[in-house]
């Protein structure tokens, strides 16, 4: 008896179709993954911080033209002038009311005496200038070119004659107030004031 040749099992059509479908799906997934990989890597890659695009320019101080050192205002020095200059400056200061100009002509301290009162005080030059407000500088018309007969009459006063020596700078207002600046060396050492010249009579 002759044996029949053995048959080789042929693959099932269903199994072949399943295998083919599986391979195609894998190929599609692989293609999709390959396409998405560069995008994913780009999204995950660290970004470098951007440097400030603008850098402030170094500010340099503006140069101002140098006109040289400014000269300080000259100070008044009575010793450099004549007595007539001091008398004129004091007369102008009392007439205008700008008594601060008298400050540099006064001694430290300055004696201030007021007629018909007990005021006889040693003041600093600044305070002595302030005390001049008593006779109201700048009010009325002041005359510092009094006739000799007038100043002689003041000097003859039994109470206040000593405040009118020959070198005193004496002024009278048309309101009746009188002021006398008595020199002490090249400056004024005493200021005498009377609110009315009537106090100087007798």
Image (cartoon, rainbow, N blue to C red):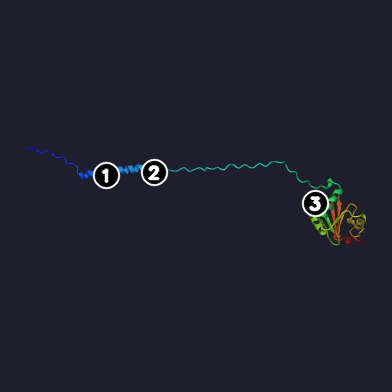
Tell which circle, 1 or 2, labels the residue nearer the N-terminal end: 1
Residue 124, quarter of the rendered image: bottom right
Q: CA distance from mark 3 to mark 1?
A: 116 Å
Describe the element under mark 3 as helix, strand or loop.
Answer: helix
The residue lying at 27 percent from left, 44 percent from top is 22
Q: Is residue 32 left or right of residue 146?
A: left
Query: Residue visible at 28% across and 43% down?
Result: 24
Q: Identify the residue under disc 3.
A: 101
Residue reaching furthest to the left: 1
Q: Quadrant of residue 15?
A: top left
Identify the mark at residue 194; answer none if there is no mark: none
User: Which of pointers 3 and 1 lies earlier in the amino acid sequence?
Assistant: 1
Q: Which residue is mark 1?
A: 22
- Quarter of the rendering occupied by the C terminus: bottom right
Q: Which residue carries the number 2 mark?
A: 39
For this view, does 51 lie left or right of residue 125?
left
């Amino acid at each position: 008896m002759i044996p029949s040749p053995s048959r080789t099992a042929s693959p099932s059509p269903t199994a072949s179709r399943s295998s083919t479908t599986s391979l195609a799906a894998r190929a599609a997934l692989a293609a999709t993954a390959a396409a998405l990989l560069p995008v994913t890597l780009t999204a995950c890659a660290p970004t470098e911080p951007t440097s400030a695009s603008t850098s402030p320019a170094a500010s340099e101080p503006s140069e101002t033209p140098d006109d040289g050192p400014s000269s300080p205002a000259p100070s008044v020095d009575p010793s450099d002038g004549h007595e007539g200059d001091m008398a004129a400056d004091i007369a102008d200061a009392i007439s205008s009311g700008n008594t601060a100009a008298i400050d540099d002509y006064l001694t430290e301290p300055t004696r201030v005496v007021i007629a018909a009162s007990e005021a006889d005080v040693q003041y600093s030059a600044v305070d002595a200038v302030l005390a001049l407000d008593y006779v109201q500088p700048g009010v009325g018309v002041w005359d510092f070119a009094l006739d000799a007969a007038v100043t002689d009459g003041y000097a003859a006063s039994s109470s206040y004659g000593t405040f009118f020596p020959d070198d005193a700078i004496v002024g009278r207002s048309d309101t009746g107030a009188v002021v006398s600046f008595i020199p002490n060396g090249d400056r004024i050492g005493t200021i005498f004031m009377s609110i009315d010249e009537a106090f100087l009579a007798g």
